[in-house]
Amino acid sequence: MRINEIFYSLQGEGRFTGVPAVFVRLAGCNLRCPFCDTDFTSFTEMSEEDIVREVNGYPARHVVLTGGEPTLQLTDTLVARLHEAGCFVQMETNGTHPVPSGIDWVTCSPKAGGRVVLKRVHEVKMLYQGEGTDLTDAEGIEAEEYRLQPLDTGDPVRNEEITKATIQYILEHPQWKLSLQTHKILNVR
């Protein structure tokens, strides 16, 4: 598998914010979002055994499979091997490809230009950039939780406006919960 990086930190977003986790970032993505803050083009080839061995080098048993887009490479066997190693497996996906079996928690973050094929996930996370944000990609996806995350533009003034607009939208549409990128707020990886 093409692995961009494996690192240990705190989950910064969504349901498991603050949970120590091993992040396995798979290289490659089928979308090219202009706001993406991840370099997923560089990679190292690793076997499933190598991946599990590296994950086992960290004390946490919560693993976050992310990307790029992890469903482009992720296999049922890697998920099974992580479970055999005692891991809880969370995946973050744009929802444009089917998910391997056995994932314990699926966070789907639909993006413009991608046709979502997932109909049932644990968590939907949409980026919000203010009035006019199109949330229709979340329609038709059944989830336990729906979260809005203010889009980080890199401009502190604009980010503050977007965060206020996100909070206001959530107050008017209480089926949504706020998701912040706490790893950026705390300046941790």
Image: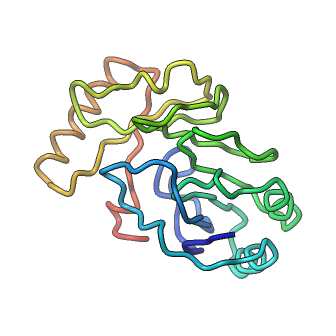
Q: Residue furthest right?
A: 84
Viewer-side residue, 42 vs 136 = 42
Considering depth in this image, is 99 or 64 the residue closer to the camera? 99
**Whole-percent x, y for residue 7 in the image:** 56, 75
Q: What is the quadrant of residue 144 in the picture?
A: top right
Q: Residue at x 67, y 62 (%)?
A: 63
Which residue is rendered at x = 47% and y = 69% of the image? 41
Image position of 104 (left or right of 152): right
Q: Nearer the viewer, residue 39 or 21?
A: 39
Q: Which quadrant would the C terminus be assigned to in this image?
A: bottom left
Image quadrant holding the N terminus, namely bottom right
Residue 145 percent location from the top left of the image: 56, 31
> In the image, is residue 119 above or below residue 25?
above
| Image spot of residue 188 (x, y percent) | 40, 70
Taking 71 as reference, is 83 above or below it?
below
Q: How is the image coloured?
A: rainbow
Horizontal side of 10 relative to 158 (left or right) equals: right
Q: Residue furthest left?
A: 157
Point 29% across, 28% down: residue: 133
Determine the residue positioned at 34% across, 69% down: 187
Please provide percent x and percent y for residue 153: 22, 51
Numbered marks: total: 0
As drawn, 81 above or below 171: below
